[in-house]
Image (tube, rainbow, N blue to C red):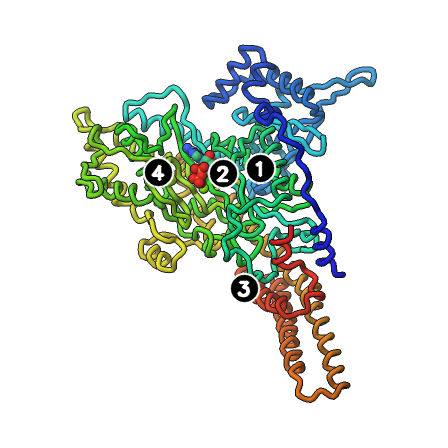
Amino acid sequence: MNSRREAMAQIANTRAPEMGGNGNFIEEFGCDVFGIKTMSEYLPKPVFKKLRQTMESGKALDSSIADDVAHAMKAWAIRRGATHYTHWFMPLTGATAEKHDSFLEPVENGEVIARFSGKNLIMGEPDASSFPSGGLRSTAEARGYTAWDPTSPAFIKRENGVATLYIPTAFCSYTGEVLDKKTPLLRSMQVLGQQAKRLLRCFGKDFEAGAKVTLGAEQEYFLIDKRFYVQRPDLMQTGRTLFGAPPQRHQQLEDHYFGAIKPRILSFMSELDRELWRMGIPAKTRHNEVAPAQFEVAPVFEEVNLAVDHNMLIMDALKRIADKHGFVCLLHEKPFAGVNGSGKHNNWSISVGDVNLLNPGTDPHQNAIFLTSLCAVIQAVDRHADLLRSSIAGAGNDHRLGANEAPPAIISMYLGEQLADIVEQIEQGGAKSSKRGKTLKIGADILPELPCDATDRNRTSPFAFTGNKFEFRAAGSSQSCASPNIVLNTAVAEAFDEIASTLENLPKSADFHAELQKILSSIIRKHKKIIFNGNNYSDEWKKEAARRGLPNLRTTPEAIKPLTDEKNIALFEKYGVFNRAEMLSRHEIFLEEYERKIGIEAGLSLKLARTHIIPAVAAYLESLGRSLETERLLGVKKSKLSAYAGRISGRLDSLIEISDKLESQISSGDKISKLIDTMGELRSIADAAEGEVCNELWTLPKYCEMLFVY
Ligand code: ADP
Ligand code: MG
């Protein structure tokens, strides 16, 4: 039996594990988090108060309490079974990083105690030389620092009965340049918060509480049986299939989306939810996605910094728990050509006190704030569409953006019929609304109520208003949410800043609402080109977008170029989110990462063609040769076999020819775009051959197996 068939026979005999009830999952929620409740139990009252202030208001940490906090954290962690702690951070690899240290400390007489000081908590000093820095630091200067982020609570992660205390940290170089994704996120939250409060003051609303950016990140993923995975070197090395023909039936019947969840998958999801809940991650929704073997998990939204950390933990848990269940979780944006890829819907909003600025609400005053915030987002997205695009660029997402199921590489905004109508009214200076017959000024009592769900959904838009938040859908499934939110926060902060500046400088005698009306209509006139409520997947939209002058940055190198533009460097420098060197280094890192990834894919395509595909086709040709010989012995006269064998031989020739071409392009260091083209040529011949060569001789597990047998 060939190994594909053997894998299928084994999977057919695999039963879903019994999950043994739910225990008290409500009580268990957050039991492995050193959160507010635990802190209040473990910390002296004054220390707890100070720490809580830091967590909730973003005020600087009082370093005198660090020893007390560290002591409490250690006592709690050890009681929960931990022996080690780690500073957990997000270097520019896009993954997370950790190095474990034990609490153990030798004292006299060969004895040991458990020790964890304030200094251990606040700062770590990992060697930074092996993390990407994009020229910010020479390899000889290895020093890097991790700094405790008290706004994201420490937690315990468990793996195989091993408990470790994780401390979320920021990561920077010896000279203070940021080497991670958390630091700029924290900076961007801070500026947006400041500008939001300033803007609200113009409306006569003064808030003690800080502004909060909120994020709900929906995570899509594939699960395939590990017994197939280990037979696909392309999945193991690149996260996606470099070869493989889509099966006859994949997602055309639309029967997977929201379908009944199969037993092995449900057991997996159940364990995933339990584990996430223990770590305080509010996983809420689980369901089958559009493509076969594709699924989604979505938590309830949280403050953005925490939500980004939690999304990293979700991706980590998906992989770990999949393994326990005999699956592999694929987070690549396009693991299988021809069926849907995976994204990460970035649901974003901002609230100050208890006011969600993007909630249309029912009282007219709130509406004025809502419409102002809405216009600010319109301006931000239009002015910085290039940066938003760059924030989700990557080799994986290139396959997805613009493919027929994902939002295109062109950034546009969907407002829905009703809001689009209102925006149009504002543009025209508060004209009569034909829809409602009311006057739509930003004034007080004449403003209509804006029902929350007056809008339909548009699944094709990369940036859609969905009731009380914006959903940025172009983010890739494997990416950290930090980058898109850094851009969104900073771009909207700039818009808030500009509007607030105009409002603050109005003469006392000015009619506030009339002036606001003017500001908003001018924003809409300037930026309405970003609004598009139609089908983003259509070819007409590509043409229309070009007419409107919207950027269409199709590949990663084009998409990250804006990181080096003066306009963008100026934006980030103005708000202290990135300095010039940090921007340029990021560009360099992302470009290098992209080129390396394609280089790996090209090398592996060649290797798979030569060691799997060509041998299978050649073996098949050999068997056809034997059949021809048999025909000859039998004296068959009018045979079609010879011509058929000739066709297979032609495929073999093409495969050999194109793989030789790929080899010479690789060795001569040809352009990345050339490698991509040749890989595509090689793949199309190989995929055609997959549909011709005897099934028994084909070594790579096929799509119909990986996507349907589990
Ligand atoms: P849908 O995508 O179908 O609209 P939901 O309305 O349930 O689904 O929301 C999807 C995600 O958006 C969830 O993670 C949800 O918690 C999050 N979300 C809801 N309100 C907000 C908000 N104010 N800010 C950020 N995210 C939010
Ligand atoms: Mg959604």
Specify the label residue 314 is tagged with: 1
Disc 2 residue lies near ligand 1 with CB under 8 A:
yes
Find residue 35 and report its image quarter.
top right
State how far apart marks 2 and 1 are (Cα): 10 Å
Q: Where is residue 441 in the image (x, y as percent from the top left)?
A: 20, 35
Report crowding for label 1: few under 14, some 14 to 19, many 20 or more residues within 10 A (C-alpha): many
State how far apart marks 4 and 3 are (Cα): 45 Å
Give the residue displayed 40% in from the left and 21% down from the top.
209
Q: Position of residue 136 (x, y in %)?
A: 55, 40
Q: Is mark 1 on a helix, strand or loop?
A: helix
State how far apart marks 2 and 4 are (Cα): 20 Å
Work out whether mark 4 precedes mark 1 in sequence or the reverse, and give the earlier one.
1
Q: In this view, does 108 lie above or below 671?
A: above
- The answer to whether the residue labelled 2 contacts the one labelled 1, judged by CB atoms less than 8 Å apart, is yes
Residue position for label 2: 217
Which amino acid type is marked by label 3?
Asp
Residue position for label 4: 453
In this view of the protein, can residue 82 be seen by the observer?
yes
Closest to the observer, 334 or 14: 14
Of badges 4 and 1, the one in the foreground is 4
Q: Position of residue 74 (x, y in %)?
A: 66, 20
Closest to the observer, 698 or 398: 698
Q: What element carries label 2?
A: strand
Work out whether mark 3 precedes mark 1 in sequence or the reverse, and give the earlier one.
1
Q: Quadrant of ligand 2?
A: top left
